[in-house]
Image (cartoon, grey):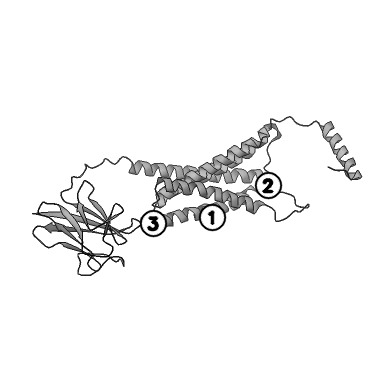
Amino acid sequence: MDTLVLVDVTDAHGMMLSRQRFRLEHPGPPLLIGRDLACDVVLNDPHVAARHASLALGQDGAVRLADLGTVNGLIVGDVRVREATVSGPGGADVQVGHSHLRIRTGGEQLAPERPDRESLRSRHREYAVAVLGALACAGFAGFTAWIAAPDDTANAVVAKLLAGAAALGGWFALWVVLGRAVRSRWQWSANAAVTLGAAALCLWLWWGIDAGSFASGSHRVRIVGGALILAVAALAIYLQLRVASRLQGPAAAAVAAVLPLVGLVAFLWIQQPSGTDVNRIPPPGRLFPPDWSRQPGTRPEKFLEEALDLRDAADRGTVP
């Protein structure tokens, strides 16, 4: 009697270290697992004994992993045990020291092959989102440069594009390198789609918030718009964490919710003046056509009258 056994060795972060296939026979010698080079499965783990465990096929056809009298034993389901049986459709997941073993047997019933309907389609969607996001970012740079410097639009566009490309390129490279280090995969298209799509949404939302606030004359527009930008940033970070790291849903959501708030607090702290300076003139906001405003304007006569009253009060030294 014999059976095939597949042993996957991963580290504590789920990184695949090795995959080996063996044939177990009964009667026959067991497979040895440990740090000793004479073992069949060699683990480079200081928390593993020289000969830590054995994998053997029993007379009943069951495959059992047994501890060989070590200090740390075996861990199955967060419980330290001395023996584990490889059974069930998914095999067995056993921790040996700080290494993780997933053991499958040849008698395992495999599910039928899944039809692949997502790989190419999802990648095409990622490419489309990345391209549309890049075009939207470039359009924002051109539009705002034309408004701010209509006489020197070309140079202003180039400067904005270079600055934006440097910022987005650094953010994109951070997630790509993280994904390669943690998951051993280059997620170019997914990270590009999230980075460029989120950047385009945030930029145009930012401009729309200013325009809406000017038109309505209400600060509520800024509050609602700021909340939307934070939500977009949190969603982008959540998606990139799921792509590039091994954080599960709740942990990734918690990190994604905290990071934009930390960034907002840091931004507001940097924007505060270092001290009270009566000569400081804050930078002007964006300029919009007067016809966009839905607020009643002030009649010129009333404006001049208020200006004269203010001058008289200043001359008397009674300016409130």
Q: Residue at x 64, y 54 (%)?
A: 270
> For the residue carrying disc 3, how many other residues have a C-alpha within 10 Å: few (<14), some (14-19), or many (20+)?
some
Of pointers 1 and 2, the one earlier in the residue sequence:
2
The image quarter containing residue 213 is top right
Secondary structure under tag 2 reads helix
Secondary structure under tag 1 reads helix
> For the residue carrying disc 2, how many other residues have a C-alpha within 10 Å: few (<14), some (14-19), or many (20+)?
few
Q: Which residue is mark 1?
A: 166
> Can I make out residue 134 in this image?
no
> Can I make out residue 262 in this image?
yes
> For the residue carrying disc 1, how many other residues have a C-alpha within 10 Å: few (<14), some (14-19), or many (20+)?
few
For the residues marked 1 and 2, what is the alpha-carbon distance in whole angstroms? 25 Å
**Pointer 1 with pointer 3, Cβ within 8 A:** no
Q: Residue at x 62, y 36 (%)?
A: 221
Q: Which residue is mark 3?
A: 182
Q: Nearer the viewer, residue 234 or 51?
A: 51
Q: Residue furthest right?
A: 316
Q: Which residue is mark 2?
A: 151
